[in-house]
Image: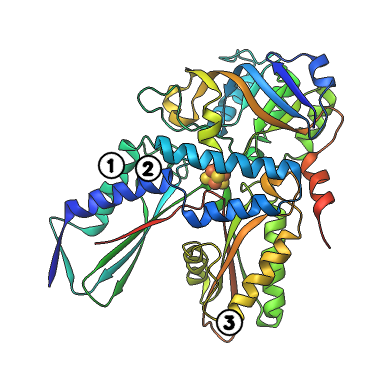
Amino acid sequence: MRVIDYQEIVDAVAKLCMEGNFDLGQDVLNALHRGYETEASAPGKDILNQLIKNAEIARNEQVPMCQDCGVAVVFVEMGQDLTLSGGYINDAITDGVIKGYAEGYLRKSMCDPFTRKNTGNNAPPIIHTQIVPGENLKITVAPKGGGSENMSAIAMLPPSAGIEGAKQFIIERVRQAGPNPCPPIVVGVGIGGNFETCALLAKKALLRDIGEPSPIKEVAEIEEDLLKRINNLGIGPGGLGGRITALGVAVEVYPCHIASFPVAVNINCHAARHKSIVL
Amino acid sequence: MTVHHLTTPLTDADLANLKIGDQVLLSGVVYTGRDAAHKRLVDLVNQGKELPIDLEGHVIYYVGPAPAKPGQVIGSAGPTTSYRMDAYAPTLIEQKGLKGMIGKGSRNDQVKEAMVKHKAVYFGATGGAGALLAKCIKSAEVIAYPELGPEAVRKLVVEDLPLTVINDIYGGDLYEEGVKKYRIE
Ligand code: SF4
């Protein structure tokens, strides 16, 4: 059985928190450049240009691309033949988040839900763990902004709504969100599962690189149709009106109960951050 | 696109020239405030007490900046979503002479009505461009509620902060107009 050291995880998570906030993924940057080429509205083009410049500054100067450095959402895939020395894995991840947000001068945004008092160190993170075969440890840190998260929604639709009903729910949600979630957005969709799994599917969909379609043909077609119809909404970059409302749509699916048809939409902004490491 | 160079405090004459879609490069003092600070400010107004800042003719930027790195004036500082301040903004416009708000996202009807009635404007800054926008901030000083951390009220001095007029004093709304232009049914 392989043994991994507590501190190794702390340091890896800290680094992912900083890199995630400083270094916008190449897939998102490429999508912003493509958007700049196709955007028909002049103010929309100007916004995309600002976002490209902003990403360059963040990367070159190692500063967060957005002041909202997010809730630290951490996905863990832990090999079942792996064990940890020196402590509990969730504590190591939490310590890593605290370290990364302190050393990276990242904004701390976690607070008590009632008193609204800031916890002061961006802990606790939100950790999703999966046990997988093997002896590797894959950690993904996806800092998630509040503005776009607030525009997310879930619906327990009747199965009779069909795929068109699901699409309408998703598009309507994006329409209502309008300029709030910092368009151009990335749309993560979960279809199926149950209440909590559906929401998690939508979140996981946001980890997929932009422009990479679902490997399932029917699902890839849904993604394509949704992207087209969302861009037809006319919201545009910054919500000022334009063609590029979304950079990408990713849909994840899972079987569900015969009585259910859950659909979740998790909206991400153009600061679509996620970095992974395999230890 | 019309570009206006404006310096705070803003006068009614400044505002009369602004139309939705216009670009503004704003300089001068701007105060920061978001959820928690707004609640405190409006509580003070309702209790008839003095505010820690004079808002007459002034502009509030809805932002909770990232901490400054050594050598930086301020960390990344882009706008936060404005609707969360909608419950408080009309009071500050009507009773304290607030003339401008900087944020991102739509405002509700009460805020829009207060802007028309008492002559105030809503500016959009590019959401998510926090590293870029921070370059326009020349100084930053916490002047109230330091215990709120990123939500403390700061006095910023800005130079040519790039903004777009979203709501003008004539009742225009760029978000509505812009979307109408590009929507495909
Ligand atoms: S929605 Fe995203 S880009 Fe916009 S302020 Fe929040 S984290 Fe930043």
Q: Is residue B156 left or right of residue B115?
A: left
Indicate the secondary structure of the residue bearing disc 2. Answer: loop
Q: Which of marks 1 and 2 is nearer the N terminus?
A: 1
Q: Identity of the amino acid at label 1? A: Lys
- Label 1–label 2 contact, CB within 8 A: no
Residue found 51% across the figure and 83% down from its top: A255
Q: Earlier in the sequence, mark 2 or mark 3?
A: 2
Residue closer to the observer: B2 or A170: B2
Q: How crowded is mark 2: few (under 14 residues within 10 Å), some or many (20 or more)?
A: many
Outermost residue toward the front in this view: A37
Q: Earlier in the sequence, mark 3 or mark 1?
A: 1
The x and y percentages for residue A121 are 34, 39
Q: Name the residue under label 3.
A: A217
The x and y percentages for residue A28 are 53, 54
Q: In which quarter of the image is residue B59?
A: top right
Question: Which label belongs to residue A122?
Answer: 2
The x and y percentages for residue A172 are 72, 62
Q: Mark 1 points at which residue?
A: A99
Q: In which quarter of the image is residue B20?
A: top right
Indicate the secondary structure of the residue bearing disc 1. Answer: helix
Q: Residues within 10 Å of mark 3 (few under 14, many from 20)?
A: few
Residue found 58% across the figure and 21% down from its top: B31
Q: In this view, does A90 lie to the left or right of A51?
A: left
Q: Is residue B133 above or below residue A151?
A: above
Q: Is residue A260 left or right of residue B147?
A: right
Q: Identity of the amino acid at label 3? A: Lys
Residue found 68% across the figure and 47% down from its top: A237
Read off the chain for label 3.
Answer: A
Residue closer to the observer: A275 or B170: A275
Disc 3/disc 1 C-alpha distance (Å): 42 Å
The x and y percentages for residue B11 are 77, 13
